[in-house]
Image (tube, coloured by chain):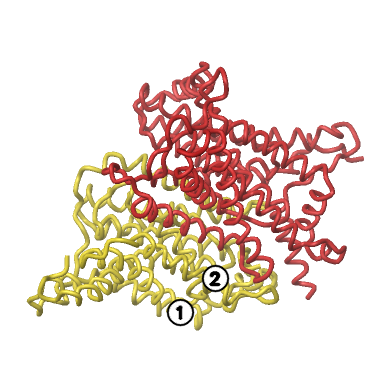
Chain colours: A yellow, B red
Amino acid sequence: MADPGIGWWGVPLAVAAGAVRAGTPFLFVSIGELLTEKSGRINLGLEGTLVMGAMSGYGTAYLTGSPWLGVLVAGVTGSILGALHAGLCSLPRVNDIAVGIALMLFGTGLAFYLGKPLIQPQAPTLPAIALGAWSHVAAVRDALRINALFIVGAALAPAILWALRSTRWGMILRIAGDSADAARAMGYSVDLVRLAATVAGGFLAGVGGSFLSLYYPGSWSEGLSSGQGITAVALVIFARWSPMNCFYASLLFGGAGALGPALQSVGITSGYYLFNAAPYFLTLFILILTSSSERRLVGAPSELSITR
Amino acid sequence: MAEEIAAELTSARAARPATMVPRAGRSGRWGPAAEAVFIPVGALLVSLMLFGGFVMFARVNPLDVYHYMVVGSVGSWFSFQNTLTRAAPLILTALCTALPAQTGLMIIGGEGAFVVGGLAAIAAGLPLVSIMPPLAVDLVMAAVGMGVGALWITLAGALRHWRGVNETISTLLLTYIGIAVLNHMVEGPMRDPASLNKPSSYALPDADMIGAIPGTDVHWGLVYGVVFCLVAYVLMFHTTFGFSARMVGGNPRAARLAGLPVGRILLIVTALGGAAAGLAGMTEIAAVQGRASATLAAGYGFTGILVAFIARQNPLAVIPVALLFGGIGASGGLLQRRLELPDASVLVLQGIIFVAILASETLFGRFRIFRREEG
């Protein structure tokens, strides 16, 4: 609800706040997916990883009283699922897309199963930094309460960009993603590189999930994720496999999701779901504009099955 | 260039269903077929054992679980009908992946076609109930559901062919667009104001619902699914069109060089796949739920993708695989009531089975027993 004092200004403010708040899980999951895809494999199972991360993070925070330990456990849980995906996909003739969908169902199922006792209790949530303490308008103060995880994520994007561009590890990762043969010729195990990338990606997706349960909305329920893990796959394509674009696109996708409720608060109630779908429309539109049957997508790792 | 062709061949091979090459020799003809049965069944048994270990953490005896799974899926006429009813939508949504897979397309948008097919069917059917006899209403609904589902997936096929847009990604995006359209319609333009807690469309009158197959409680969707599978099988494996379609899947470049109308073939198979999923959505509305609401997107489309993969994209094998997962779903209620396992335990079991059977794909060709003796 926007403060009566700021009226229509509440809409852009709420969208900006929503972009940061709802964009944070997108940011982590999409950077995780980016790492995996850069190594030449797609993990469609990050939705399951996200939900498992949310559940395990919440459970840990509830049992130990430490939300940050929850974030760590969520990441580790995500890594385990990532390792499972990478391990299965390294077997010959096993299809990465099918395994991803299977792990998506498995991860959500397992999280619902194990999370049953966590629906009632309230776990401690992650702290937020009140950057808006100077303002006397409640809406401004709300909007400027920035969660620490967002800052971590925002720092992660340029860090990953630098690592991919300028470090040996980043180069090996990109080689595995662009030409498995070249990586093999240089003496690197493509399967190991992809394992590492998928485990790291799973870790980030798990952390993204813990943001959902430990900060916003800040509780565990079976309807917690509204498909952020799957959206992240679209987001990475939308972002052209660039970490900085992932950051901007996460804010955009988060903001698009916040537009519906923000408009609702000033009386526009219809079209809520269509705003939610805006990122998908946008991604499809951009795909149609930029794809060509003659060449690959710009920036796409050549080994990736979905860009062929 | 050579690399590109090689890459194309590998990707085509990955997406293509396993071709069963008859081999001469001792285990000759039955070898590959036996392999295609024994390996997934072995993986199924392994996953049941894993699940047994899993429930032991909840202090539940695995033998009880297996017992109630059998009782709950095939133990009585009632539970068997439950199994059949649950299998019906899976058969149709699996075809949405399996048919295009014959041409090398990986479609994962069955859920979207299911949802928009069901939504369009009821949108078309509701205004007609007062002016047309029920049978005509159902026929119109089925035609609209199939047509809209077909358009939905054909769009992905067309984008793939003419714009090079990857069909896996476009169908995934279309799925979420479809679900958003569903939510928008049932909470906005199509909403029945009387549905307060669970926004939904107006209900289809009972007289216009598709009834049950005579003598059973199983709705006609099962028959539609089985017929669709049989037709798809004959079309794909016993007609010139099917041969051309599989040739496109095997080697698109060779198919183009042979003068096959690749674009038209892609459009037809994607249309057929989408029509199957749209029909599933229509039957879900007209035989089960009676009205459109958010619960229409219950995940049948996603499960269907995995059913298709486990059936190795063969339209006939889709039927038993869908029955298996229908049976697991049907036994969930009993597991919940008798053993006090959470309802999500069925999801866990399905997940384990999917992962295990998909991983078992790698075992094909590793066992000598299924092969001709060397030398």
Label 1 environment density (alpha carbons within 10 Å; few <14, some 14–19, many ≥20) = some
Name which residue lies at 40% across and 29% down. B56
Viewer-closest of B288 and B7: B288
* Amino acid carrying mark 1 in the image: Leu
What is the chain letter for disc 2? Answer: A
Q: Is residue B125 left or right of residue A134?
A: right
What is the chain letter for disc 1? Answer: A
**Residue B45 in sight from this viewpoint:** no
Q: Is residue A57 left or right of residue B85?
A: left
Q: Quadrant of the C terminus of chain A?
A: bottom right
In the structure shown, which secondary structural element does the residue marked by tag 2 occupy? helix
Within the image, what quadrant is residue B152 found in? bottom right
> What residue does disc 1 label?
A161
- Circles 2 and 1 on the same subunit: yes
Viewer-closest of B246 and A72: B246
* Amino acid carrying mark 2 in the image: Lys
Q: Is residue B186 left or right of residue B153?
A: left
Name which residue lies at 12% across and 70% down. A3
Q: CA distance from mark 2 to mark 1?
A: 12 Å
Q: Position of residue A111 (x, y in %)?
A: 37, 45
Residue lying furthest front in this view? Answer: B131
Q: Position of residue B268 (x, y in %)?
A: 71, 54
Viewer-closest of A213 and B243: B243
Residue lying furthest left in this view? Answer: A136
Q: Which mark is residue A38?
A: 2
